[in-house]
Amino acid sequence: MSQQRGFTLLELMVVLAIIGALLGVATLSVGNHHARDETLAFARQLTLIMGAAQEEAVFQNVDLGFALDVDALQLLQYQDVQSQEFSANKSLEELAQLESNPWQPYQGRALNAQITAPEGIFMALSLDGQDIDFSDLLNQERGPLPALLFLSNDEYTPFELTLQHTDDSLFAIVIQGDGMNIPRWELIQYEF
């Protein structure tokens, strides 16, 4: 007669603990694909919007700018109070407002005036190596001021915009613009 031997409870627990540890390491090394994919899609969208803003500024002969917050962008258009085009049919109060801040929300049809980042994605802006404090540019009384300018002469503010996701700190996406060429993005993977 042969004896049948099974696994002890202790042996099963050890095997399950090893499998659990391996799955944990694999999950940490892979990161959060959903967060990265969502951030990549937003980076591509921003790059396209910025390229379109550059073209719109040139073709419509207007100066455009983006006011930024950590999770949103607003497209603004420069309106010269001295220009008949912008000052016609405006009240004295509207002219005074325009004089205090000539950057008004973009009214054209070609571009979205407001772009909001998907939940969990936040932005940081650097100009000439200095981080920009968005609160300095977002004034409730005066109205928003642009951090990035896209001018009618086909130039724009050189910048570095970093996108990160709260669900995965192992990567960042950096959108860079040199002031002349179409802005480009790059995925940066951080090591543990």
Image (spheres, rainbow, N blue to C red):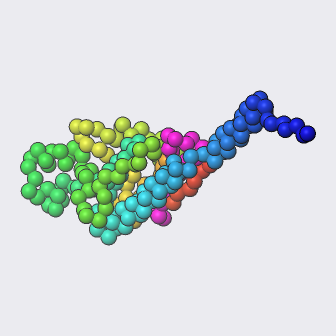
Q: Residue furthest front?
A: 1
Q: Residue at x 22, y 37 (%)?
A: 141
Q: Residue at x 11, y 44 (%)?
A: 93
Q: Position of residue 159 (x, y in %)?
A: 47, 52
* Residue 130 against residue 83 in the figure, above or below: above
Q: Is residue 167 magenta?
A: yes
Q: Is residue 192 magenta?
A: no
Dominant SS type (magenta)? strand
Q: Residue furthest top?
A: 10
Q: Position of residue 143 (x, y in %)?
A: 25, 43
Q: From the viewer's perspective, is 86 left or right of 70?
A: left
State which region is magenta.
164-183
Looking at the image, can residue 153 be seen?
no
Q: Residue at x 45, y 42 (%)?
A: 120
* Residue 94 against residue 150 in the figure, above or below: above
Q: From the viewer's perspective, is 62 left or right of 134?
A: left
Looking at the image, can residue 1 be seen?
yes
Question: Which quadrant would the C terminus be assigned to in this image?
Answer: top right
* Residue 146 against residue 166 in the figure, above or below: below
Nearer to me, 27 or 184: 27
